[in-house]
Amino acid sequence: MSARDAILKRLRERTDGALNAPDSDFSVVTGRGWSIGERLERFERLITSVHGEVIHTTHDNWTVDLAELLHAKGVHRLALGREHPVAAEARSALDARDVVLLDADRDIESWQQEQFESTDAGLTSTRGAIAETGSLWLWPTPDEPRLISLVPPIHIAVLDADTIEDTFFDVIEAHGWADGMPTNALLVSGPSKTADIEQTLAYGVHGPRELVVLVRHAEERK
Amino acid sequence: MSVETYTPQAFHRQAHDALGSPQIRSNFRKAMDGLMSKRRDVFSDWDLEALRELGANIRLRALARLPELLERLEANCEASGIKVHWAEDGEEACRIIRELCEARGAKSVIKGKSMVSEEMHLNAHLEAAGIEALESDLGEYLVQLNEQTPSHIIMPAIHLNTDEISTIMHDKTGLARTRDVDVMTAAARAQLRERFMSADIGISGVNFAVAETGTLCLVENEGNGRMTTTVPPVHIAVTGIEKVVEHLRDVPPLYALLTRSATGQHVTTYFNMISSPRKRGEHDGPEEVHLVLVDNGRSSIYQDDELLDTLRCIRCGACMNHCPVYTRVGGHTYGTTYPGPIGSILMPHMLGLEQTKDLPTASSLCGACGEVCPVKIPIPDLLVRLRREAVGEGRGNVPGAGVKRTKKEVAAWKGWQWLATHPSAWRGGTAIVGKLQALTPSKLGPWTECRTAPRPAKRSLHALVKRHQAGKDKSDAEKSAANHVIKKGKDEEERS
């Protein structure tokens, strides 16, 4: 008998008999009822508490803020996608400036060394965010692959303020994740960190040292 | 630093040594105090009881449907291109992984944190086959450099302080001595990035495997888990068969419990959900993904209604953080892959009670572990159950059951039972003991190492009361003592 069949047989022929599966009450992880303002406040408070940076901007003006950010952080080489509106707008706005745009939609084998060693930052869109934990959610695509939010030392994520939802449970349910998962789904809550040396926090141990979230609003915030 | 080998058989000696080490005592005390208060704070605005109830309930439901869910997990993984392998024990799992490495001609493997791989001694197995296995979690990396094993399931290098780590990094990697944690972290980042790029295969554990979607979930802060599962051309995930959950919506409550219970964080930096290898048109991620499902004693635990609760564990480590014994002796003292309370109820099934007979007694049964467990495993009850199994008074379905049973002890309890159920013999016996009180030995094994030996009273309470009632009291002291007892008895009668 194969290991598989032997294991399953033992589980099925359980000595103490079949077990009853209880129903689950999920109310403790949903139904927060936060307003848009509360969500935004909570998201910002939590993600900044773990060293994430938040910059508020508008749909019309965000590429100007992006350019300023790149300048302030000394980013000369930026990896980004091409087709997603975030990448497309960034490309057209940044074209003339002093930033080398690296195409992320290439097979990693052709530019691994470049991505690891000479890419200053990766720019990605996000699908949304979670207020309760201050988390971004990303479903990487061929246009914006998995590693550009991980390998470069700075990850710049663009988030639309109206896509922040209350809880992780709410996101999974509202967007029907169970109906079709992508190759990789990610929650990102701050830059890479460790406390493995005597409980002392250090950032950027393997992934980005910095995470900057550009939160886009419909209008200028008063 | 020398390589130290810890074994569960030497628990008492190791505990003695650890208790005598100010370094170990202070490293663990400091860390555990911090973790306990962080956990308390992060749950302060939650209905913790409702969340624990849900967590326990989700795990129980998964176990109730375990065979069916494993088949669904397998079918859904295979449908999206993740190859599933089954292993009866650690040895078979090691062999499967080695063969996968050999099929790719792999010479170097980079690892994300996986306690199951520790449980099956995967690194040693691969090294023996000429395949280098490098740990990439910073704590695991440091422990591996120091030729040790993890002393905590979440924070593997918790037993080391900054100075010790500085010495390790200096001696093993040539880094100039420093107390600057950022400098040491940056050095490790640079050293490991080279290895991520060149590794042939990445090996990781799994925190939750979702049957409904065939998704492998990994929880981490560092990003080494994402690196391990994305950069090398092959990813092998290895996990125990109990890690499966039924639905995707079962994941958020367990994740909420896990990070808060483990380190007091409201969330970890990354939650990485993998549902297939690189698809056509995608530009990164491994071409091959394998899932190795390991039994290694779990299906035996599964047979018994009481022991089953052991399998609810989500490996947060809160039980060790709150354990007064673990905090004092540290993780290595247990001599097993999983230390602390969860290790004491899990390892006897994996290694047998012959080797682990001291672990279920390495507890004061204070109950803290059971109170903080996010999935409400009644750990103290399970410790007692294993104590019973060890002396042959349980169901006999734990390997090595009865190993602590001795004829002397059995006879002693039998004698006690007989005496206690035969009043005249009891009275005679206690009278003799009272008469011979002067002969009580002053040394009674371990009991008197830090206590004075108990001395039986001249007359038993029973005898005193009897004398009082018969009006034969001689001594005033005895009289007042007996009066007190009688009065108390009367009070209770009146109340009832």
Image (spheres, rainbow, N blue to C red):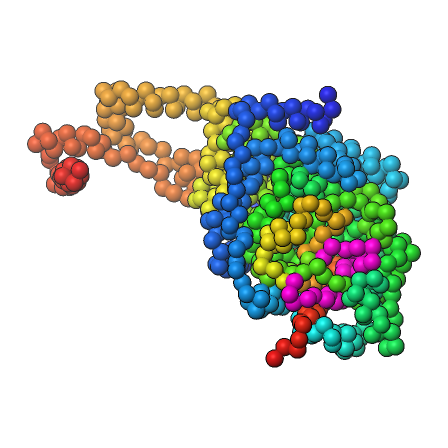
- Give the residue at x 72% y 26%: A3
Q: With respect to residue A102, does A94 lie above or below?
A: below
x then y, percent, for residue B309: 53, 36
- Give the residue at x 72% y 31%: B87
Q: Is residue B120 left or right of residue B52?
A: right
Snapshot quadrant of residue A124: bottom right
x then y, percent, for residue A194: 67, 59
- Give the residue at x 57% y 52%: B256
Q: Is residue A122 left or right of residue B329?
A: right
Q: Nearer the viewer, residue B239 or B198?
A: B239
> Where is the C terminus of chain B found, in terms of image quarters?
top left
Residue B143 in magenta?
no
Q: Nearer the viewer, residue A155 or A36?
A: A36
Q: With respect to residue B371, does A1 lie above or below?
A: above
Q: Which residues are magenta?
A: A138-163
Label tally = 0
x then y, percent, for residue B107: 86, 43
Q: With respect to residue B115, does A202 lie above or below?
A: below
x then y, percent, for residue B165: 69, 58
Residue A156 in magenta?
yes
As drawn, the residue found furthest toward the bottom would be A222
- Give the residue at x 36% y 33%: B441
| Residue B168 visible at all | no
